[in-house]
Image (cartoon, rainbow, N blue to C red):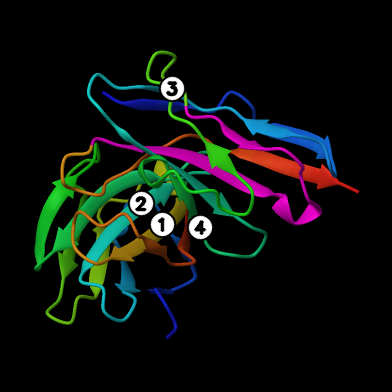
């Protein structure tokens, strides 16, 4: 069975510092990986998807199949980046069902 | 467009009771997926409905059942409630069962006492 691990419950950084939110996965096939974000009092929303290789709000994530990781990075954190971040995996089976990690709370202090 | 609408927002039930949660998808979306999010956990997939049929199911007992109506809205039913069913139940709609462009609702907070 697939599993997504986000080892940090909380990550606290200062504004302007680099950010890396860790995500490791276990899955025997070729998965699709996603990052979802939930800002305070807002709904869960898609941040980025590995297959699109986009940079959203300055965030990037590279799929490393050798290390089975999909870490989320941003070179300079902003206060508005403070939110809950979830890494998610899909089996790429034609159905958009997701397995989520437990999430990491990112706090960016001024 | 109100996006995905879920009702009720909160409810409290007694162990052993049954509950029905409702979801109206975003306009134009025809697929509804349900997730359970326990406190401190990520969302866990329950099932997905498309064309009024359950297309995929996660690791949940038969006490959890659902329905999708011709207007694409959906219900989640839970029978014989357990204390462990207390969670936030999220509905997400999408355009087709393979579309990852989920739009999530705000959720229904269920407390079982």
Marks 3 and 2: in contact by CB < 8 Å?
Answer: no
Percent x, y of residue A17: 82, 36
Work out how far the residue at label 2 is from the one at label 1, CA to CA, in angstroms: 6 Å
Q: How far apart, in angstroms, are the residues tagged by discs 4 and 1?
A: 12 Å
Inter-mark Cα distance, 3 to 1: 32 Å
- Would you name the residue on which mark 1 appears? B89
Q: Secondary structure at mark 4?
A: loop
State how far apart marks 4 and 2 are (Cα).
12 Å
Image quadrant in which the N terminus of chain B is located: bottom left
Q: Which residues are magenta?
A: A70-91
- Do the residues under discs 4 and 1 have CB atoms within 8 angstroms? no
Residue at (32% x, 72% y) in the render? B22
According to the picture, the residue beneath numbered tag 4 turns out to be A44
Q: Secondary structure at mark 2?
A: strand
| Tag 1 secondary structure | strand
A51 horizontally vs A48: left or right: left
Horizontal relation, residue A36 to residue A110: left or right = left
**In whole angstroms, how far apart are the C-alphas of marks 4 and 3?**
25 Å
Q: Which mark is residue A64?
A: 3
Classify residue B52 by image quadrant: bottom left
Judging by the rendered image, the residue that carries numbered circle 2 is B35
Q: Chain of mark 1?
A: B
């Amino acid at each position: 069975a697939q599993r997504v691990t986000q080892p940090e419950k909380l990550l606290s950084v200062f504004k302007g510092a680099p950010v890396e939110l860790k995500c490791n996965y276990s899955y025997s096939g070729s998965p699709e990986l996603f990052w979802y974000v939930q800002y305070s009092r807002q709904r869960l929303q898609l941040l980025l998807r590995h297959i699109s290789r986009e940079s959203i709000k300055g965030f990037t994530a590279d799929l490393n199949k050798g290390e089975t990781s999909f870490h989320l990075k941003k070179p300079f954190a902003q206060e508005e980046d403070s939110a809950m971040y979830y890494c998610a995996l899909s089996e790429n089976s034609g159905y958009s069902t997701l397995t989520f990690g437990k999430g990491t709370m990112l706090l960016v202090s001024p | 467009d109100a996006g995905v609408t879920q009702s009720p927002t909160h409810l409290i039930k007694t162990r052993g009771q049954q509950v029905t949660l409702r979801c109206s998808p975003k306009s134009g979306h025809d697929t509804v997926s349900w997730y359970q999010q326990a406190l401190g956990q990520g969302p866990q997939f329950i099932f997905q409905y498309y064309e009024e049929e359950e297309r995929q199911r996660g690791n949940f007992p038969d006490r959890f059942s659902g329905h999708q109506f011709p207007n694409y809205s959906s219900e989640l039913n839970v029978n014989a409630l357990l204390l462990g069913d207390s969670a936030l139940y999220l509905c997400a709609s999408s355009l087709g069962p393979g579309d990852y462009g989920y739009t999530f609702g705000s959720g229904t907070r269920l407390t079982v006492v």
